[in-house]
Image (cartoon, coloured by chain):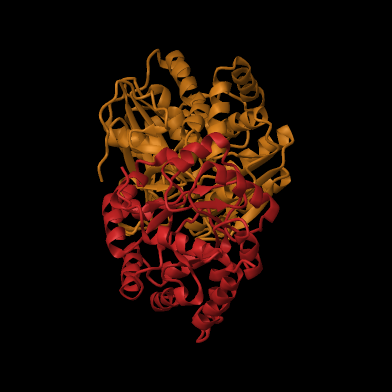
Chain colours: A orange, B red
Amino acid sequence: MPTNSAKPESYRSGPDETGHFGMFGGRFVAETLMPLILEVEEAYNQAQIDPSFQSDFDFFAEHYIGRPSPLYFAESLTQELGGARIYFKRDELNHTGAHKINNTLGQILLARRMGKKRIIAETGAGQHGVATATVCALFDLPCVVYMGSTDIERQAPNVFRMKLLGAEVIPVESGTATLKDAMNEALRDWVANVEDTFYIIGTVAGPHPYPAMVRDFQSVIGREVKEQILKAENRFPDVLVACIGGGSNAMGLFHPFLDDNLRIIGVEAAGLGVDSGKHAASLTGGMPGVLHGNRTYLLQDSDGQIIDAHSISAGLDYPGIGPEHSWLNDVGRVEYVSVTDSEALDAFQLCCRTEGIIPALEPAHALAHVAKIAPTLDKDILIVMNMCGRGDKDVFTVARALGVEL
Amino acid sequence: MSGIGVETRLTRKFAQIASDSRGGLITFLTAGDPTPSISRDLLSRLPAAGADIIELGMPFSDPMADGPAIQAASQRALKSGATLKGTLRMVRDFRQEDSQTPIILMGYFNPIYQYGSQKFVNDAYSSGVDGLIIVDLPPEEDEELCHPALTAGLHWIRLVTPTTDHKRLISVLQNTSGFVYYVSITGITGTRSADPETVKKAITQLREMTDLPLAVGFGIKSSEQVYTINEFADAAVVGSALVDTIRANLDDSGQPTAELCDNVIEFVQDLASGTVRT
C-alpha cells in the first residue's frame, strides 16, 4: 500500500484544505451528509476566530470541568520503577471522570452556535456517552446515544448514568453490536435528521473536520502540560506516553508538542496479543482503509471487511484509529507500541498500590508501557503520561479478570 | 478523460425504455444473498421477470447508508462467503447468457480500495459491469475511483439527495454518467417513503440541470409506487423490499426455502407491471 509521507516542515500544520493528513483523513461520506459536513466545517472555522467562542469554552472548562487538571509527580511509582521521573496528567479528575468532556463541551458550544436542536452520539465504554449526556443536560438539549448491545451489557453503570442525565440510550443490534456499529447507527440517524441534529463524535476520527476539531478541543491537555512542567521542572519532558483507541486523549497531549524535541509514544491495545487476532491495535496489526468517513489504519480482512477489535478496555475496543495518528506513524514522528490485556491489568494494580489512584483500564495500557521503559531510563529523564480516565467504571471488569466474585 | 462510448448497454436500455413509452425498473440484489448459487439463479431470472437494469450490491460489513433490510442482506452474503472477486465472477457468468441487461455495482469504497482501485475498474469492465454507485465517495474524493472508473469505460452514477443544493448539484453532476440516482428521502434505505409531489418537484428541477436519465430510489416498495414514480422519472429503483422478500423466504434457521426464487421473481414481475404508463 503506497503512503505519501514526506517529512513536513511542521508536524502541526495538518490537515490540508481537503481534510487530509498525508494520504489519511478525507471526507468519505454519503452525499446526503456532505452539505452538513461542509456546514460544520464552516461554522468551526468561524468559531475559531471568534474570541467569544474560546472564552465560553475556557469558562466552562474552568468552572464546570475543573480545568486545569493537575500535573502530578508520581513519586512512589517513580521509586518503585527505579528510573525516569514519572508525571501523570490528571485528566481523570475532570467532571465525569475522563478527558472526554473537553471535547463534548467544545462540540456542544458549536452545535448551539449552529442553532442545532438535537444531539446524537455513539459510545463504546460509555464515557463519551456520559460526557455528551452531561453537556446536553447542562445546555438543555435532547440527547440520543447509540451503544452496541454487547457494550450495554458490560457497561451497565454508565448506561444508567446516561439515563439519569436525561439521555435516551438506543441499543444497537446490527453488525457485531459494538462501538463501530454504534457509530454506523449514529451516522444513519444523522442522515435521516440532517436539518436539526448535531453529531458529537467522541474521538479524533470521522470525516473532516472532526479529527482536527476534536484534537483542537483536547489539545487543552497538552497546552496545560507545557505550562505545568515548566513550573515544576523548568524544562519540557523527554517522553510523552498516552493510550490510543481512536486516539483523542493522545492527540490532545501530543499535538502541542509535535514540533518539540522529545519522544512521543502512543500505546495501542494488544488484547490477547497482536498475533492472536484478538486485539485492537490498528497501527500494529491493521492496514490503511476507509471507514466512518476517513482513510486510516483499520483492522480488516483481505477483502476489506472490518474485523472486530478486542480489548479488556471497552474504550480502546475500536477497529480504527484517528487519521492524524496514522500519518504520524507513517512519517515516523510518533512511536506506536502495544500492550496486552494482562500487562494492562498488572499496571492497573501497580497504580492502585503505589499511588492510591484507581486508573481506568485505558490509561492502564499507557502505564504498562511506562512501567516497561522507566526502569531502563536515567533518573533525570522526565516522562509525562496522560491519566485520561478513572477506573471506577472498570472495577467489575477487573474483578472478573482477576477471578474475584463481587 | 472518459473512456465511455457514446452508446453503451446503459444508454441503449434507457433509449429503449423511452421508445416503449414506459418507465424503467431497476432492481437491487446483494451479491451472494442468501447463498452464492441462489443469488446467481435470481440474477439470471431478473431480466425476464421485468428488471430493466440490475443493481448488484457488493457486501460490506459496515453499510452506513443502508437500513436494516440491506444490512441483513450484506451479513447473510458475507456469512455464506461472499467476496468482491466472487461478485465480479457472478457478473461474468451472467454475461455468458445475457449481453444486454446493464449491471451496476453498488456499495462502499473499502473493499474496492483493498482490491486496488485501478485493478478493480479494469476487472469490473472486463467482467461486463456497466457502472458503479459508491455511496461513500462524494465529488470531493473523485480522484479515488471516479476518475479511474470513467477512464476504464464504466459509468459513474451519483446520488443526488434532497440536501444537495443548487451549488453542489453542479459539482455532483459534473462527472456523473449513465443516469442520475435521485434519493427521494433524507435517510437510509428501506425506511420511509417520500411524498410523490415533493419528488416530482425535485425531478422537474433536476431536468433543467441535466439531460441524463433520472432514476428515483429509497422507500419504493410496490408496483403502485413504481407506477407513480415513473409518471415523472425515467426509472424506479426497488431494493429493500426485494431483499426483504428474500428474508421472508428463509426458514427459522435462516436456510432458504424451496419457494424462495419463485416468490422473489413473482414479486419482481408484479413490480414490473408498474412500469406501464397509461
Q: Is residue A138 visible?
A: yes
Residue nearest the viewer, comparing B34 with B239: B239
Vertical side of B76 occupied by A200: above or below: above
Residue that appears at 37% across and 70% down: B81
Relative placement, left or right, of A157 versus A365 is: right
Q: Position of residue A236 (x, y in %)?
A: 37, 18
Q: Position of residue A178 (x, y in %)?
A: 52, 55
Relative placement, left or right, of A208 versus A54 is: left
Q: Is residue A398 visible?
A: no
| Quadrant placement of the C terminus of chain A | bottom right
Vertical side of B2 occupied by A208: above or below: above
Vertical side of A297 occupied by B133: above or below: below
Q: Position of residue B241 (x, y in %)?
A: 58, 68
The answer to which quarter of the image holds residue A93 is: top right
Residue that appears at 50% across and 35% down: A210
Q: Position of residue B58 (x, y in %)?
A: 41, 61
Residue nearest the viewer, comparing A186 with B105: B105
Residue that appears at 53% across and 41% down: B209
Residue nearest the viewer, comparing A10 with A208: A208
